[in-house]
Image (cartoon, rainbow, N blue to C red):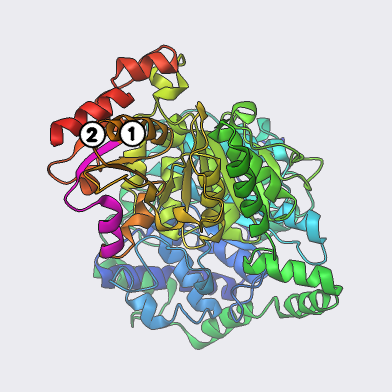
Amino acid sequence: MSADASATFAPARPVGKMDERLAHAIRFLAVDAILKAGEGHQGVPLGMAEIATALFTRHLKFNPKDPLWPDRDRFVVSNGHGSMLLYALLHLTGYEKISLSQVQSFRELGSHCAGHPEYDPAAGIETTTGPLGQGIANALGMAIAEARLRARFGAKIVDHMTYAFVGDGCLQEGVGQEVISLAGHLRLGHLVFVWDSNEITDDGATSLSISENVAERFRVAGWHVLEVDGHDIEAVSDALADVRKDDRPSLIACRTTIAKGIRRLEGQRGGHSGKLIDSDRDEMAGTLSWPATPFAIPNEVAATWLDAGTRSQAEYDAWRRRAATLDGADRASFERTIAGHLPEGWRDVTSTYKARSIVERKPAYSIETSGEVASALYDVIPDIMTCCADLEAPTNHKRQLAAFTAGDNRGRYVHCGVREHAMGALANGMAAHGGIIPLAVTYLAFADYERPAMRMAALMGLPVKFIFSHDSIGIGKNGPTHQPVEILASLRAMPNMLVFRPADAAEMAECWEIMLEHATGPVSLVCARQMLPQQRSDASRENSSRRGAYVLAEAEGTRRVTLLATGSEVALAIEARAILQAKGIPTAVVSMPCWELFELQDEGYRASVLGAGTARVGVEAAMKFGWERWLGDDGAFVGMTGFGASGPADALYRHFNITADAIVTAALALL
């Protein structure tokens, strides 16, 4: 139907017997796996079987023998509870890692067929999904990455689609509307959402919670919208062909029946994940003339599905020939980019910036120094794309980058608008796609808007760079709503997340170097708003931040006190050290830009830095939670004990007693 068609669905047309049986193979693999596991979500694989059949047998560009083919179409099951739909498709089309034994071990420990899809591109699983809305935002990021790489390398090398299967839950989550709006604005014609419109959620009928025309939300956001019967393979296939002709992102709204095939649960709330019983399977097998033996796929059906897995072989071979004919420099650049390797010489940027900062010794805003390092790297590393949510000027990370727009996909700066939820998750999609190093930039107070995406990045091990400014009460008069006193602790509690809080420009350059090298998980770079003095004076030092913590200023004499600080509070610790030394108390200052890296060091190094037997005082304009690890039972902490307040930064530090004098008092009390 046209984009202006009403929300009506034509009756299903007759479909070939083999097409029906291809869809039934998905249904029975899903039901058999769920019955064996004793639990699972059958609604999606039963309700979307025909849709998936149309996509995989007629339209999707993929190669199970080379799952990492750079120009493959990306396929995301955003309604990830329906994971058995994905596993059935991957098994049937010949992905080696999704064998029948893996399907039979669905939801068991160690299986590739986990309860929700878990990121494993080599198995055909493009992203981890389950928290609703994250998957479609990942798909948006994949489409942005594809468009940027196509603009950079040309359509002969990069020209593929991103398809996302979407449920009502994905579209009810707030992040869903952010995605719809931004994708339409960017006019991403290679992005297709296929909506499983079954009018049911786990809470019951959708009429209990929404009354708007969902398809109309897409239309007003500038999407191409088609509405079809989701159980009509020909209608779905026609729609999938039609969307390729439109330069807008597309929604195919497919009216379906949840749990189709299980008469007891069809169209019911229980169709989502209600417990299946053996008689459900027996009845469905009888009705659909399917083998009674679990996991048995008729030979001709299995062979047809495997043939579908080879359908793109000609396109694959042609692409390899085109890639091989790229000239030497372009081919090397493409291969380096897709492999995720950094260009030669990039460390010269960070080392030069570090050396200059130490020589010049100029105070600087740390968010400004981060922007300066990033700006110097942009020319050297064309893979970097920066996403920012509404705060371009105060976060200072655009510099010379042109905007990525609907009219020009060559740009490397994505104006995300006031959409932090989508920004974090689309950055994950860019990283999962490959060929892009995404930065996501905003205030630290808004990290909680990105939190689901940050957790998913850590879970998947995606190298996303989350960059935050305005990190403490140091932001001053904006007040406690913008003073993230508790967020550092919460980020440090997240597994597989490196959290950096540099103290000066030299540490900033070092942290950037480590961030770019780190490819097995995300990082959070936390920057201050206030001016920070340059602390480091030894330009010959190696990257001291690489070990997470180091002695910035050793005691003059046998150390009695160790002051441990991060970020802007390192300057206060240095000031307090001078007072204590003047009192004849040998005191060292330890800068701790990354706790997680320090935790990885050997016990001997940690002991030498922390100062065994010394009085320890931790200093940070944040909550104490977590500092006990470094301070021990007898250490003291100078920092926040509650939320901040409105006022100038210097007045707030005095008001909350985060001063050099307070540090000295705490140290003396321990001696």
The quadrant of the image that shows the C terminus is top left
Say which element carries label 1: strand
Which residue in the protein does label 2 denote?
A: 637
Q: Which residue appears at 60% of the width and 45% of the height? A: 9
Residue 53 rendering spot, x and y as whole percentages: 57, 67
Q: Is residue 614 magenta?
A: yes
Closer-to-camera residue (431/62): 431
Q: Residues within 10 Å of mark 1 (few under 14, many from 20)?
A: many
Residue 311 rendering spot, x and y as whole percentages: 68, 77
Q: Which residue appears at 52% of the width and 83% of the height? A: 302
Left or right? Give the position of 373 relative to 120: right
Q: Amino acid at mark 2?
A: Phe
Residues at marks 2 and 1 touching, judged by CB atoms closer than 8 Å: yes
The range drawn in magenta is: 604-618
Q: Is 18 above or below relative to 435? A: below
Q: Amino acid at mark 1?
A: Glu
The quarter of the displayed image where residue 241 is located = bottom right
The quarter of the displayed image where residue 220 is located = top right
Q: CA distance from mark 2 to mark 1?
A: 8 Å
Q: Is 390 above or below relative to 294? A: above
Instruction: Specify the label residue 620 is tagged with.
Output: 1
Examine the rendering and report whether any part of residue 571 can be seen.
yes
Closer-to-camera residue (26/439): 439
